[in-house]
Image (cartoon, helix red, strand yellow):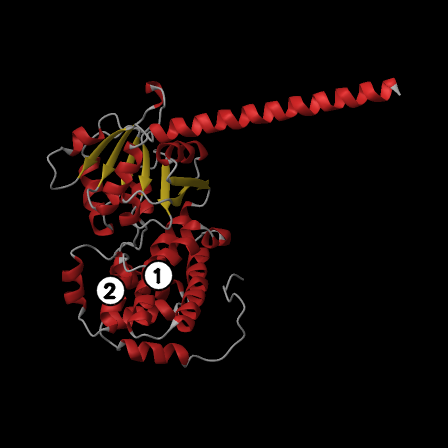
Amino acid sequence: MANSATHSKAKGSNKEQRLEQAAAAVSKAIAAEDAVQSNPGNSRPPDQLMNVTVLGAGAWGTALANLVKVNGHNVNIWSRRGELSLEDAIADADILISAISMKGISETITKLKALKLPTKTIITSASKGLDFDTLNTPSQSWSSAYPNNPLVVISGPNLSVEIEQGLPAACVCASLDADAAEQVQEAFSSDRFRVYTNDDPVGTELGGTLKNVIAIAVGICDGLQLGTNAKSGLMTRALIEIIRVGTHLGGQTETFFGLAGLGDLMATCSSPLSRNYRVGYGLAQGKSLEQITEELKSTAEGVNTARALRKLAKREQINTPISRLVYCVLEGNITPEQAVTALMSRDLKAEGLDLDLD
């Protein structure tokens, strides 16, 4: 009986110790959280801070710069109209972030080639689009010019206005160089911006690029007041179209179901903060493309991407019914109402994924 009582007492003592250890762990976690709240910036040692240069002082470039700056890194922002020279901006840059429009990339690369960019500098492409002449993506233009530099693509459901407001968001840093992707991940990650990595820069970039065309289609759908059923069906079939194009060009199927694919599609197609959505909405209201562009006072990449995508789809023989009709509306060949009729009148078939992967 005595042995039983002793065993029971020892068992109770062990339980108390475990409870005390758990309480201590909780107290430590709360203290750490309080420290973060009192100092929302990153408390990295000076030798872990990086020099980051952002090319492009628009809403997106500024938002990216602020995300890095809040972590304590040294940040330079360059633009064509700014006072900082390009040479001074890239001096000692550990990470070079391109947040300029697609049409400005070629010119910027030409300027950079006249300067000396160290091969250690990680080039991070945050632009979305297709070059009409070459049909290259932004990262393809950068990698062609700087084949020896690590290249990272950053993309996801990231409306710049919400990021500037400090609202929580997430994105993907994609690269074939895992170390480079992790360095960019570290530079951006904070308690309001969660960053994942993957090894599919092609799919990550194309997901962010192609959804801009679809956002125009969804804007048309909402502008015509076609309802939630129509919009849901449109976005679902559009995702299949994005996957079809993206995998044909080398992207991984699973990438398009992640943040850079489905996530970005949902954000861009469901918010009036999206410039491309506003283009479609305006077209459905009877406005001209020129009038809409003037009202936006900024670039809606989906317009130029739709034209380049039509050229690419014809060259590669890829079926893109939704993007093709967006192109026709933008060119003034059909009305938004006629585009809807054309989509609803397509031949009947089984759903399936219909990715044409064989």
Left or right of 21, for residue 277: left
Please tell me whether residue 185 is drawn above or below residue 43 in the rendered image: below
Residue type, label 2: Val
Q: Identify the element where label 2 is drawn.
A: helix
The x, y position of residue 344, in whole percent, is 40, 79
Given residues 27 and 310, the one toward you in this image is 27
Mark 1 surroundings within 10 Å by alpha-carbon count, few (fewer than 14), some (14 through 19), many (20 or more): many
Residue in view at x 49 percent, y 28 percent: 29
**Residue at which label 1 appears:** 269
Please tell me whether residue 79 is drawn above or below residue 238 in the rendered image: above
Given residues 237 and 34, the one toward you in this image is 34
The x, y position of residue 8, in whole percent, is 79, 23
The x, y position of residue 98, in whole percent, is 27, 41
Residue in view at x 42 percent, y 53 percent: 263
Quadrant in the picture for residue 19: top right
Q: Identify the element where label 1 is drawn.
A: helix
Cα–Cα span, label 1 and label 2: 11 Å
Residue in view at x 28 percent, y 57 percent: 274
Classify the position of the N terminus by image quarter.
Answer: top right
Count up the numbered dots: 2
Classify the position of the C terminus by image quarter.
Answer: bottom right
**Residue at which label 2 appears:** 279
Mark closest to the chain's N terminus, 1 or 2: 1
Mark seen at residue 116? none
